[in-house]
Amino acid sequence: MHRLPRDPFLRSPLRLGNLLRTGRSRCDMENEPASATKDGSLHGYESLHRLLSSELPPHLFQEVSRVLYGCNRGSAVTPVPQTEDLSAAAKEGNFDVQTFEFTADLEQMRAPRNVCVGLIQNAIVLPTTEPFLKQKHAIMERVTSLIESAAKAGVNILCLQEAWTMPFGFCTREKRWCEFAESAEAGESTKLLQGLAQRYNMVIVSPILERDESHGSTIWNTAVVIGNHGNVIGKHRKNHIPRVGDFNESTYYMEGNTGHPVFETEFGKIAVNICYGRHHPMNWQAFGMNGAEIVFNPSATVGDLSEPMWPIEARNAAIANSYFVGAINRVGTEVFPNEFTSGDGKPAHKDFGHFYGSSFVAAPDASCSPSLSRCRDGLLVAKLDLNLCQQLKDKWGFRMTSRIDMYADFFREYVQHDFKPQVIHDSYLDGLPAMNSRTT
Ligand SMILES: NC(=O)NCCC(=O)O
């Protein structure tokens, strides 16, 4: 007997018809390899969570969910009801909207520190062959409407995806994409967001391609942090630049020079670990050591390369550093005018592969939200009680037991050019018995 999918995405007569007619599960239904289908969905499901919740009997799904997604104070992180206003905007604007809540224990000496965080993922709007200004303005218009929806949801701190004003043209190595770079302090996107931040009393993190006029028009990959009064609080430049697959970003900009700043805002202490920096545990750690309570990870990454890592790295960082993480990935497939290769022997191609969206929030208690759609624009809203950060520090003591002094000594030695790795050699490898070897 077939269970009717609970996912509204599947309620199209065509999809359901296929399922019922063939009598097969979704994965073998379309006789495709065990990977995502062309529309970016997982064989018709917008996310892994929706696939599991629709395909598994409820009692099995509950167990899977507990193990895969964890529990926040004993319960799965499940969607909380949205206002009609917000649901209507999502329907009309065809974007995925999901709202979650992470609670903390009530404390006697501190009031709860509630904050509402929003993550926006979006596809480019126009083809990459359109005039650049038209492309940028079309994205800005779309993102403005998503921000307005975030305001309807009461979001206090919002983060956009990496290089949100442009297609992710860095795969091509063509320098013309540099035209999208703007001043962090006075560029068009910053001005737009300053107005929205002030109007909606919202802190907005805006990851853009930055052109630094004061330093020879240098290009950076930068997150601008705009305060809820419309002021630019500061900026952070991406610390780790990828040299993997089609991510030819090192052709455009260097490793950032802004350290690991934490921005103290009216709603909490936030930091930004831009995309590839999520593969570097010390990058996450340094933001935590500077006191971050929420670290955003605005990203642009594709399925073939990184999808198995995606649900793990941000979540591990949240656990290890006792803070919340908001991980955001762009969505859609971007096709570029000219073919490019990336020195991997694969045929020249014009697209980057599918940016799989799947933005989510991870909490310090190892719970995490289900992710947004793999194939549509989306807004994830998460209500957090920041007291959970300290409660987890007290419970697990990861910060207290981290032995930074021991590692400081080790790193001091490691950076010396004559550093010798601490390896203890088994003399049997040389055919000699070890000095204290067991004799029989
Ligand atoms: N944008 C970016 O740094 N992408 C690198 C690929 C990845 O980290 O998954």
Image (cartoon, grey):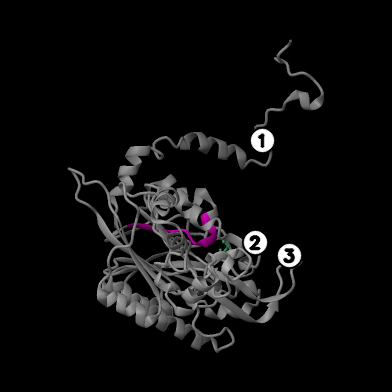
Instruction: Report the front residue among 289 and 218.
Output: 289
Snapshot quadrant of residue 343:
bottom right
**Residue pointed to by mark 3:** 344
Element carrying mark 3: loop
**81 versus 85 height, above or below:** above
- Residue 332 is left or right of residue 87, and the answer is right
Please tell me whether mark 1 or mark 3 is closer to you in this view.
3
Answer whether residue 244 is visible to the viewer in this image: yes
- The residue type indicated by label 2 comes to Val
Is 275 part of what is drawn in magenta?
yes
The residues bearing labels 1 and 3 have C-alpha atoms spaced at a distance of 31 Å
Snapshot quadrant of residue 155:
bottom left
**Residue pointed to by mark 1:** 421
The residues bearing labels 1 and 2 have C-alpha atoms spaced at a distance of 27 Å
Question: Where in the image, quadrant-wise, is ligand 1 located?
Answer: bottom right
**180 versus 295 height, above or below:** below
The residues bearing labels 3 and 2 have C-alpha atoms spaced at a distance of 10 Å
Magenta segment: 269-278
